[in-house]
Image (tube, rainbow, N blue to C red):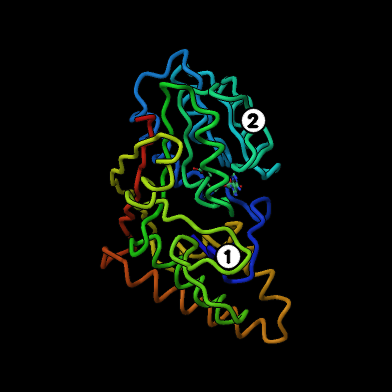
Amino acid sequence: MGVRATRGGGVEIDWGVGSYEPTGELLAPVSEAVVELAGPLAGRTVLDVGCGTGNAALAAAARGAVATGVDPASRLLTVARERAAAQNLTVDFLAGDAASIPVGDQSVDVVLSVFGVIFAPDAAAAIAELTRVVAPDGRIVVTAWPPGGSMSVVNAAAAKFMGEVFGQPNTSASQEPSRAGTPKPLAWHDPEALGAAFAPYGFAVEVNRKSLVFESASAEEYLERSATHPMAVSADRALSQRPDADELRAELWSRLLAAALSVNEDPDGYRFTADYTIATARRS
Ligand SMILES: C[S@@+](CC[C@H](N)C(=O)[O-])C[C@H]1O[C@@H](n2cnc3c(N)ncnc32)[C@H](O)[C@@H]1O
């Protein structure tokens, strides 16, 4: 999927660059699963935080929900609006950040975030907002990639390399120790960490695991398809500032290929199964 290096690698991800759309298509089944898990949605208000191209908001609207999507990346919101129009669905797509959600207090029945809020630099501020906007009997559902899972193997290889190049320790955001002056990261997959983060707001958290299968003709094809992902494009831009950019790109490619092959389950092609977590928080 590319480089996850908002923290540590010194590379800010600009979610508007490149093309997130191919990844959004691959991740759409997760939004379907999350929306199914949320139960009957007809007439309920649903908020998709970090909606990207709108997967979860559109899936909820297709089930009759009054859906809103929020994302800081204006280009992705434009794509989401186009998708809604093409599917004849009404969804409000708003510019906003998980740490400052542009909806009223206790106004949302179901708050969803599919691999979205996990990218918020200030997890504590995001949790304050998620708990602020959800209705008294509502729920918050957040998905994350657990460290050590197949998806994290490729991301961690990329983040490690970027950390080496830019001279900072680098792992995935959820594993990285906090540095002076930076907000404390949160292990969004971890029941204990989530329980502790939500408890001050009077919420209890339950975490379930599911998996998503990724298939391609080859590991190379999988990586090439991921090369337009905003993380990969943001990392490539950072590398391009270096005089030895070509060597660095070649080294990054060989590390990513080795990581991608290490999780391959198909000797005749390319397939891996990525576990992800679905955390549900409710007022206790
Ligand atoms: C991996 S994509 C997931 C998009 C979409 N939920 C999906 O399932 O395809 C991560 C999304 O989180 C958004 N994002 C990044 N930082 C954010 C923040 N601080 N607050 C809210 N969303 C954020 C990005 O713009 C991007 O759309």
**Badge 1, how many Cα within 10 Å: few under 14, some, many 20+?**
many
Residue 64 location (% of width, % of height): 47, 16
Question: Does residue 127 appear to the left or right of 267 in the view shown?
Answer: right
How many numbered badges does the structure rendering display?
Answer: 2
Check disc 2 and report its element: helix, strand or loop. strand
Q: Residue at x 63, y 25 (%)?
A: 92
Q: Nearer the viewer, mark 2 or mark 1?
A: 1
Residue 31 location (% of width, % of height): 43, 37
Check disc 1 and report its element: helix, strand or loop. loop
- Note whether 209 is above or below 152 in the view shown: above
Residue 206's quadrant in the figure? top left
* Mark 2 → mark 1, Cα distance in angstroms: 27 Å
Q: Residue at x 41, y 19 (%)?
A: 41
- Note whether 255 is above or below 89 in the view shown: below
Foreground: 172 or 24?
Answer: 172
Foreground: 166 or 74?
Answer: 166
**Badge 2, how many Cα within 10 Å: few under 14, some, many 20+?**
many
Foreground: 65 or 98?
Answer: 98
Q: Residue flagged by tag 1: what amino acid is it?
A: Arg
Residue 188 location (% of width, % of height): 42, 51
Task: Report the quarter where the C terminus lies.
Answer: top left
Residue under circle 1? 7
Residue 200 location (% of width, % of height): 44, 40
Q: Residue flagged by tag 2: what amino acid is it?
A: Phe
Residue under circle 2? 93
- Note whether 19 is above or below 163 in the view shown: above
Q: Quick check: marks 2 and 1 in contact, CB under 8 Å?
A: no
